[in-house]
Amino acid sequence: MAANLLWAGQGVAVKLMAGALSPVAIALLPLYLITLLALALLCAQKNAALRFRAAWRFRTEFFLAGIGGQLIAQIGMTLGITWSSASNGAILSLLIPIFGALLAVWLLREHMSILRVVVLMLGLAGIFLVSPPHLHARSAHHIHEFAGNILIALGCFGSAFYNVYSKRLLAYFSGPEILFFSYLSTTVFSLPALFVFDPHCLSNLTRLAPMQWAALLYLAIFLYGLAMVFFLRALRMVDVVIASASLYLTPLFGVALAYSVLKERLAPQAVLGSAIILFATLILFRFDGPPNVPEPVG
């Protein structure tokens, strides 16, 4: 439950930093920070050189997990929440196990059932209800919010890809090692791009207010770091089905935090859309087995 509460705070933290840093910087700078901290911890271990050599043999897999999973997940979620709302980000995170079940068909050669197709259609319907496209009232705000929800859904797809793809690496690396080496791959690939698209990202840090610094450190240490540690520890203590089921608490915490901190409210159709997504996710979990996710992305 502690991990779910930490993941739920992502949307609020992103909203607090919006305007002070670009969405790309908000997504990547905390990831770079936790990567540096993890690097220091790994280098302090006696078998560090051995683990780096092992990871180098799987460099293609780690780059695919980092770029196709982590990078898309963090950029999509952060930019989407910036354009939409923290509440929508929390609700739409329920798409992760739905996308994961479909990706397992491709990556893990699982059977594509009619149930999975129906669940996907229900999830997409929920996206439109959470933020309908407003075809008759083409206001910039509504279009911006709808585009933000699509980006959040793309981030959820990246997260699901990472969770499913990293499953094949569990035979060779521990969960924390998979996280670190995928973070490292993301850092190597994205760092040049960050300075191309946002060359003043480091100088902008000097203008952050104390609350915004707290939000950035929260994303780095608590979201990308401790939340994952808590979940991995839970997997060692309880059955994976119970640990995976607890992920459905994240939207509840996320909406509550968005209301209490940001004063966000859900429109009636958004409540209906979130209920449909939750129903689709629970149906998938109940009748299609536990999601194939060794550990989720925050």
Image: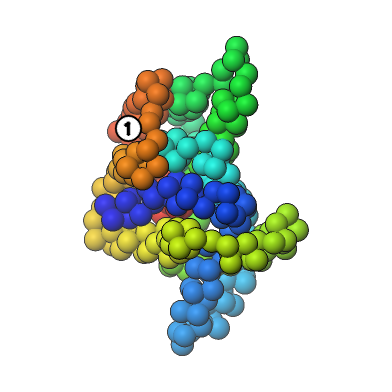
Q: Which residue is mark 1?
A: 282
Side of 116 where 237 appears, left or right: left
Give the residue displayed 70% in from the left and 57% down from the top. Answer: 198
Judge whether residue 122 can be spotted in this image: no
Residue 249 lies, in percent from the top left, at 30, 43
Which residue is most to the right? 196
| 246 or 108: nearer the viewer | 246
Give the residue displayed 38% in from the left and 31% down from the top. Answer: 265
Q: Quadrant of residue 285?
A: top left
Side of 203 where 74 appears, left or right: left
For label 1, the SS is helix
Q: Is residue 278 above or below residue 106?
A: above
Which residue is most to the bottom? 46
Residue 77 lies, in percent from the top left, at 53, 45
Give the residue displayed 37% in from the left and 38% down from the top. Answer: 263
Q: Is residue 208 above or below residue 102?
A: below
Residue 172 lies, in percent from the top left, at 48, 67
Judge whether residue 24 can be spotted in this image: yes
Side of 81 where 294 appears, left or right: left
Residue 239 lies, in percent from the top left, at 26, 53
The amino acid type found where label 1 is placed reads Leu
Side of 20 where 87 appears, left or right: left
Q: Is residue 156 above or below residue 51?
A: above
Q: Quadrant of residue 137?
A: top right
The number of callouts visible is: 1
Give the residue displayed 28% in from the left and 56% down from the top. Answer: 2
Q: Residues within 10 Å of mark 1 (few under 14, many from 20)?
A: some
| 202 or 49: nearer the viewer | 202
